[in-house]
Amino acid sequence: MLARLPWLLVLFRVAAGPAMIALAAAGQGPACAVVLSLGVLSDIFDGIIARRLGVATPALRMWDSRADVLFWASAVAAVVVLRPGLIPALWPAAALIAALEIGNHAVSFAKFRREASPHHYLSKAFGLGLWLLFGLAFATGRVGPVLWVVLALGVASQLEAFAITLRLREWRCDVPSVLSLRG
């Protein structure tokens, strides 16, 4: 049963996305921030637990990535529902990051016939930045300069993901950094 815990954490994150949207529709900003936080914590601990239990697999990492995309897309939808006044500030940044994410997956599919799943350090920093950004949006309805810091992290993360994909000779997940690749 313990070996299933990482998968349960991934599934929790999948369920947390629609829960945020439902809470946003009910006008529950603080509750959205709590579900967001639980989802982010599930993302942090699924990989740690999987590695400690020796059950980390490429399939788990790919589903972890898919759950992340669904979770963050749901967070965007929840902000749109709860805080529509933030749309003008957030949509250009969200569109840029989404385009870069889609582009990186397209390059990975073209090169390896598999989706990208590097799980590099910058992507982790970006995830923590998103946690702060969306937490502020849910709790206060303001994002301020945090938006620009998170956007810069997101662009840097996506550019590094592209570089990782381009430098890999064969597909693999969990590449800490483009600098960790040899030759």
Image: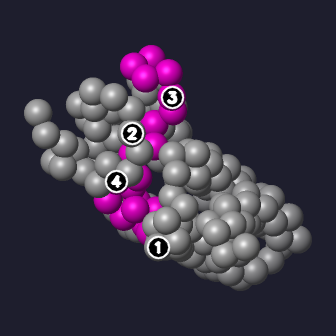
The answer to whether the residues at label 2 and label 4 have Cβ atoms under 8 Å apart is: no
Q: CA distance from mark 1 to mark 4?
A: 19 Å
Residues 60 and 150: in front is 60
Q: Quadrant of residue 59?
A: top right
Task: Please state, as top left, top right, bottom left or bottom right, where the C terminus lies in the image.
Answer: top left
Q: In the structure shown, which secondary structural element does the residue marked by tag 3 occupy?
A: loop
Q: CA distance from mark 1 to mark 3?
A: 26 Å
State the count of labels: 4
Q: In the structure shown, which secondary structural element does the residue marked by tag 2 occupy?
A: loop
Q: Which one is closest to the eye, mark 1 or mark 4?
A: 1
Q: CA distance from mark 3 to mark 2?
A: 9 Å
Location of mark 2 (residue)? 172
Mark 4, residues whose alpha carbon is within 10 Å: few (<14), some, or many (≥20)?
A: many
The answer to whether the residues at label 1 and label 4 have Cβ atoms under 8 Å apart is: no
Location of mark 4 (residue)? 120
Residues 14 and 150: in front is 14
Residue type, numbered disc 1: Arg
Q: Which one is closest to the eye, mark 1 or mark 3?
A: 1
The answer to whether the residues at label 3 and label 2 have Cβ atoms under 8 Å apart is: no
Q: Residue at x 16, y 48 (%)?
A: 179
- Which range of residues does the magenta coloring cover? 110-129
Location of mark 3 (residue)? 114
Mark 1 or mark 4, earlier in chain: 1
Q: Residue at x 75, y 80 (%)?
A: 31
Overall secondary structure of the magenta section: helix
Magenta segment: does it hold 178?
Answer: no
Residue 26 locus on image (x, y percent): 88, 71
Q: CA distance from mark 1 to mark 2?
A: 20 Å
